[in-house]
Amino acid sequence: MIQKLMPPVSRHPLTRALVTRTPLARGIIDRFVAGPSDTDAIAAVAGLADLGLLATVDLLGEDITRAQDAADTLLAYLGLLDLADRAGIAAGLDVSVKLSALGQAVPRDGRKLSYENAAELCARAAAANATVTLDMEDHTTTDSTLDTLVELRRDFPFVGAVLQAQLLRTETDCRDLATAGSRVRLCKGAYREPSAVAYQGRPAVAAAYARCLGILLTGSGYPMIATHDPALLNLAGRFAEHVGRLPATFEYQLLYGVRPGEQRRLASTGATVRVYVPYGADCVPYLTRRLVERPTNLLLAARALRSR
Ligand code: FDA
């Protein structure tokens, strides 16, 4: 029920005002978002580096339908990479981007536009020795995102993509992408999807995740294991050891503000750990997904506020 209601509610202007202006909302934002500006993102990346954690930075914003807004998003990402370069932290940094933020949903030429914008972003990332990962959105965009991935990788082989274990198609996609040089982030999937295309319920999604994990870890690509689920993290560690994967050949990825103790613990075992750092003013859809996944995140934020 909460999953059905949240997306439309999150787009309502009143919700946006409530979600960004109340003290509880500020607590949630501070916990899960680096801040509104690129300097906040860079400061968060530097702070994580001090803890031995890598980062992938995401400029919040999606559902763009005007070419000018997509161009603005591209400029903001280019500015972020310039800033990271000047701060000396661009090499090894990853940038996460939604093709919808680069114009995929712009009427008529959306796919071409998002490809061109993504290619410009990749060229700048290549110059900075950074990488780019295409976030995955709802299932109606999976084919176009993976097609764009293939096109981008011809010129920029470092571009990675996200696969969502909850989709019925994903085991096949994992097999296709478990090839040398291919960076694949495996997550459960944050979008509510119909049973025609997706497993329903946590146990079925977790089982699908485990199967996909097996395919990626036994393949020859670079798996990026994106979950906070203790059982799956444990399984991934044991399976990686079983197939003889060295820490440099795969990584764990967790979200900024989620299980920070576990992020540090994994890194202390010698594992490669990357934190997904969102920044920007348009944080409502992102935070809505985090609250739908785990309503107790509200309690965490409330507790953090009380202890200030
Ligand atoms: P899930 O939410 O099912 O939780 C499982 C268990 O983890 C809980 O029972 C609890 O034990 C523990 N846990 C979770 N949150 C916790 C918290 N706050 N504190 C303590 N324990 C907690 N999705 C998508 O559709 N497209 C994308 O591109 C991405 N990208 C992405 C990048 C990265 C780096 C991550 C980590 C995730 C994504 N996602 C995503 C989101 C993903 O699909 C998924 O919605 C969330 O990661 C939540 O699923 P989990 O597997 O983390 O566990």
Image: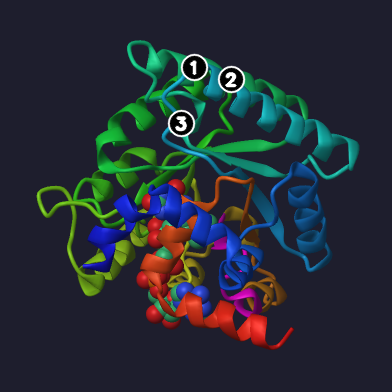
Is 135 placed above or below 149 here?
Answer: below
Answer with the quadrant where ligand 1 appears in the image: bottom left
Rendering coords of residue 141 (x, y %): 31, 34
Where's the N terminus, which quadrant?
A: bottom left
Ligand 1 closer than 8 Å to label 2 CB: no
Up the image or down, 45 lies above or below 247; here it is above
Could you tell me the amino acid type at mark 3?
Leu
Tell me the CA gap for discs 3 and 2: 12 Å
> Which quarter of the figure has residue 27?
bottom right
Which residue is located at x 81 percent, y 40 percent?
84
At 49% across and 76% down in the image, what residue appears?
298
Q: Position of residue 111 (x, y in %)?
A: 38, 18
Please name the amino acid that badge 2 sits on: Ala
Whole-number angstrom distance, CA of label 3 to CA of label 1: 12 Å
Secondary structure beneath label 2? helix
Q: CA distance from mark 1 to mark 2?
A: 6 Å
Within 10 Å of disc 1 (Cα), the crowding (few <14, some 14-19, many 20+) is many
Query: Residue 49 is drawn in which quadrant?
Result: bottom right
**What range is drawn magenta here?**
250-262
Badge 1 element: helix
Front residue (pair 197, 151) = 197
> Mark 1 highlights which residue?
67
Q: Amino acid at mark 1?
A: Ala
Q: Which residue is mark 3?
A: 99
Find disc 2 in the rendering and name its residue.
Answer: 71
Whether residue 31 appears in magenta in the rendering, the answer is no
